[in-house]
Image (cartoon, helix red, strand yellow):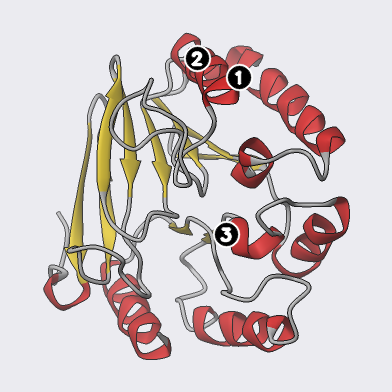
Amino acid sequence: EQVLVRQAVAHINRLQPRFVIVCGDLTNATPDHARYAAQVSQYHQDFSQIDPEIPLVCVCGNHDVGNRPTATSIDRYRDNFGDDYFSFWVGGVFNVVLNSSLLKDPAGAPDRLLAQQKWLDQQLDNPQVQHAKHVLVFLHHPLFLEQADEPDQYFNIPLERRLPLLEQFKQAQVRAIFAGHYHRNAYGRAGEMEMITTGPVGRPLGKDPSGLRIVKIEEADLQHEYYPLDDVPPQVE
C-alpha cells in the first residue's frame, strides 16, 4: 500500500489538481488499536510528499473513528487529522464534508450526530450557497450504491437517515455526492444528483484495480472518470 500511495502521489504532483481528497479510512487500525499511532505517522509521512501547493482534504472513515464512533474516537481523529465535518469553497464550488460513521451508527455519540445535522442545516441554508456554481458532498460511506431506496446493508447508510438527507440535498441542489468505503466503484442517481463511489488506492475488493478518480468541473458541467494507477493520463486539459 505504501508503494501504491507513492504512485498516486506522483500522479497528483504531475497533474496539479485544485485539491485532492481522500474519502476515508486514512488508517486501517482504529483509534483503540495498538498499531494506530504508527499508521497515523505513516499516513502523514506518505501524504506529506504531495506538492504543498495542492491542498489535501481528509475525510474520516469507519476505520478512523470506529464502526460505532464515540466522542473519544472522534476527538482522537480530530487531533491527528482535523475536523470530522467541515465545508470549503473552491472556484465557486461549495464543498461539504460529513462524518458518515455518525450517520451509519450514531448510538455511541448521538449528540455529535445532532451537532453535525444542525451545522449542515446552517450550511445549506446560507444564501451564498444558493449562488454556488455547484454543490458537492464528500463522505466515506455511500448514501446508496445504485438505488436511492435500496435495502440497508453494510456498505450504505440506513434508510431512516438516508432518505431525509437525500431530500435535503435535493432541496439544496447538490450536484454530486462522492464516497469511498466500498473498495470498488459504484454509481447511482437520485433524480439529477449523482452518487459516485470510488475504488481504493489500497486493496481492492472487486474487479476494479487500485486507482483514483479525476473530476473535471466546468461552469455548468461535471465529468469524472476512474483510472487504475497504471493508466492515469499524463495530463488533464
Residue at mark 1: 124
The quadrant of the rendering that contains the C terminus is bottom left
* Gap between marks 1 and 2 measured at Cα: 6 Å
Which badge, 1 or 2, comes first in the chain's sequence? 1
Q: How many neighbours does mark 2 have within 10 angstroms: few (below 14), some (14-19), or many (20 or more)?
A: some
Of the pair 158 and 93, the residue shown nearer to us = 158
Residue 126 in which image quadrant:
top right
Image location (x, y in percent) of residue 202 = 38, 75
* Amino acid of disc 1: Leu
x and y, in percent, of residue 81 in the image: 69, 65
Position of residue 18 in the picture relative to residue 112 (left or right) = left
Q: In front here: 32 or 124? A: 32
Which residue is tagged 3?
58
Does 77 sit above or below residue 49? above
User: In terms of secondary structure, where does tag 3 sit?
Assistant: strand
Q: Which mark is residue 172?
A: 2
Residue pictured at 32% horizontal, 81% vertical: 10
Residue 114 image-quadrant placement: top right
Report the number of discs.
Answer: 3
**Label 3 vs label 1: CA separation?**
21 Å
x and y percent of residue 72 in the render?
87, 59
Residue 178 x, y percent position in the rendering: 40, 42
Label 3 sits on what residue type?
Cys
Q: Quadrant of residue 12?
A: bottom left
In front of the other: 199 or 34: 34
- Marks 1,2: beta carbons within 8 A: yes
Picture residue at 35% right of the left edge, 65% below the top: 200
| Image-based side of 166 in relation to 78, left or right | left
Q: Quadrant of the N terminus?
A: bottom left
Looking at marks 3 and 1 on the same chain, the residue that comes earlier in the sequence is marked by 3
